[in-house]
Image (spheres, rainbow, N blue to C red):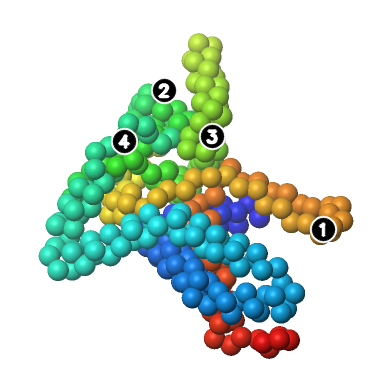
Amino acid sequence: MNDFARGVVREPGAETARQFVHRVRMLAAIYAVMFVASIAGMVILVQWGRLLVTLSQRSNVETLAILFFLIFFAYFALISGPGALGALRLAYYTALEAARSRAVAEAARIRALGAPGRSHKSVALNVIVEKEGQPGEDFELRIEDEFGSMGCVRVSGARLTHVPAHGAGTTSVFIFFEHQANRLLMEAGVSRRLNIVEWNTINDETLEEYTGLVDFARRLGSHLGLAESWPKVTLTRAQCDEIERRFSEVCRALRNEGLLPEWEYSANHKLPLIPEPLGLLSLDRSEKRVDPLSSMGTAAAIVVGSALIFAFLVLAPPWVPGT
């Protein structure tokens, strides 16, 4: 279940560079589909409102449900609007790349991202990460390709920080780093694995508490002369170079993702074993982070399904008394 939650809810589509590129494309498509379906749903409710109200009154359904769905569609059109605009811009840059060259398209993407933001995104790992030959020192992993830099990932003990060269940065780069580092460690025969345990975009206070505790353990271990006062992983220079090479493969996807809104939230899921009105027993599961691909994907499926139901009622209205 933990692997399922990680692969579907927390960290989908980041195990390889190809999956990462596909993930960004899917996210852009989800925003566009959600926006179009929301607008279509509102048009159906407004254009054929009299028919739907008549059906609801004759079938003993609360008429206010029509108003609820109108607000429902308007809400999702509002939150998906920036994403749909980002998807439209991505389509334009793709067409620009086909018509001109990739260099021209990449330069346009970089200009659209703008100057780097002041606040940086950070996460905390379950282990301290060090570079071979630099014990106890911070180090950086560059994110760049032949068309420009997307900043770097700064490794400070158990903290990862994306220092962007353009735009506001992204948290998905941490997930990609985690998967690539774990794959390289596994190939080297190292059993210990990296896991992201805190996100400053979701709860910056707990991240600061956690990293403060890790830093205290590091200093205490150094003072006492301990070899390891906190679980630690050491990356060789060759492994760091390989991670930077893999970062270069997703630079275009990172530029594309920077043009899309980033929804970073935790989530609670409840499964009632005995439903209301009794509600005697329910199961509850929480996730510290839900990836936008899964959260927005689920929302898009609900919006599209609702719009299709109303479209079906308009195209093939059921028979009810009085109609």
Residue 39, image x, y percentages = 44, 67
Q: Quadrant of residue 84?
A: bottom left
Q: Which is more foreground, mark 2 or mark 1?
A: 1
| Residue 203 marker | 3
Q: Residues within 10 Å of mark 3 (few under 14, many from 20)?
A: some
Q: Residues within 10 Å of mark 2 (few under 14, many from 20)?
A: some
**Amino acid type of disc 3?**
Asn
Q: Residue at x 61, y 68 (%)?
A: 66
Residue 272, image x, y percentages = 78, 57
Q: Secondary structure at mark 2?
A: loop
Circle 2 residue? 136
Q: Secondary structure at mark 1?
A: loop
Q: Residues within 10 Å of mark 1 (few under 14, many from 20)?
A: few
Q: Earlier in the sequence, mark 2 or mark 3?
A: 2
**Amino acid type of disc 2?**
Gly
Q: Residue at x 28, y 65 (%)?
A: 91
Q: Is residue 320 above or below residue 195?
A: below
Residue 68, image x, y percentages = 60, 62
Q: Which is more foreground, mark 2 or mark 3?
A: 3
Q: Quadrant of residue 178?
A: top left
Q: Earlier in the sequence, mark 3 or mark 4?
A: 4
- How many angstroms separate mark 2 from mark 4 (CA)? 28 Å
Circle 4 residue? 117
Q: Secondary structure at mark 3?
A: loop
Circle 1 residue? 276
Q: Are marks 2 and 1 in contact (CB under 8 Å)?
A: no
**Amino acid type of disc 4?**
Gly
Q: Quadrant of the C terminus?
A: bottom right
| Number of marks drawn | 4
**Amino acid type of disc 1?**
Glu
